[in-house]
Image: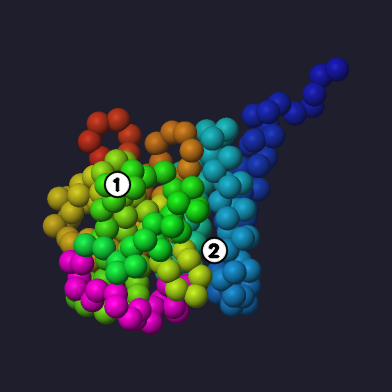
Amino acid sequence: MEWGLTWLGIASLLATGAVAALVYFRQNRDHARWAKPDSEWKTELKSMVETLEGAVGDVDTGVEELNSAIRELSEKLAQADEREVAADAEPVPGEPIDADATAPANVDEYTKELKARGIQLDYSKLRWSKKVRADGDGRGNLGWFVDSGGGKRYFIHRGRKTLIRPAIPRDLLAEWEKATGKHPREVELDYQTGRGKGNHAWYVRTYGGNTWRIGTGKGAAAVTPLTD
């Protein structure tokens, strides 16, 4: 028996639906649905991102629009995480307020949280950097970045609950610094548009509202400012 639709045809239909979803999203971004608590609509966004990523992998047509949709939704997720941190940023007694602090005061508790989430790092070589405001003000609990010298880097915030997410690796952040002349403290959001196999771009947005794409293909990282 012959099937009426090929896999490419099915993927094309998926891509068409994804683009339609993007149009609806952009036309209704200020609708009451976005007034829902982050905990409710973040799940919806994650599902949409996964669907769109699958469509990009199978369909050549419409890739640019689909990639734009994935980036936009990924940024929304990053913004939701940032709001959670900002709402739970009360200073922690004993925590260092120096912008150049080298580790949280209760570093063992942070390490325990990382291990509990299955984060693969060399725990004998952890390097910490405190997230601070653009003006260098180190007060408040805005979270920490951590890595162990490899290609993986994470952000962790401990408050009423713990948030752990992947963060832009140090080498790519250094390429962004070199290309833009800016300081890491100016970064408000960093997020990636894909997971798993393959090269996935990272994006950095500053407190000033400017965004750059840091491509991770073969050769040197390409740092490109976004105009939209």
Q: Is residue 18 magenta?
A: no
Q: How far apart, in angstroms, are the residues tagged by discs 2 and 1?
A: 46 Å
The answer to whether 75 appears left or right of 49 in the picture is left
Left or right of residue 65, residue 6 in this image:
right
**Magenta-drawn segment:** 83-101
Q: Position of residue 69 (x, y in %)?
A: 50, 53
| Local SS, label 2 | helix
Image quadrant of residue 16? top right
**Residue type at tag 2:** Arg
Quadrant, the N terminus? top right
Amino acid tagged 1: Ser
Query: Residue 57 versus residue 42: which sits nearer the camera?
Result: 42
Closer-to-camera residue (163/212): 163
Q: Residue at x 45, y 51 (%)?
A: 115
> Residue 88, relative to residue 223: is it above or below?
below
Q: Which residue is mark 2?
A: 26
The residue pinned by badge 1 equals 124
Confirm whether the magenta stretch covers residue 86. Answer: yes
Along the viewing direction, whichever of 140 and 60 lies nearer the viewer: 140
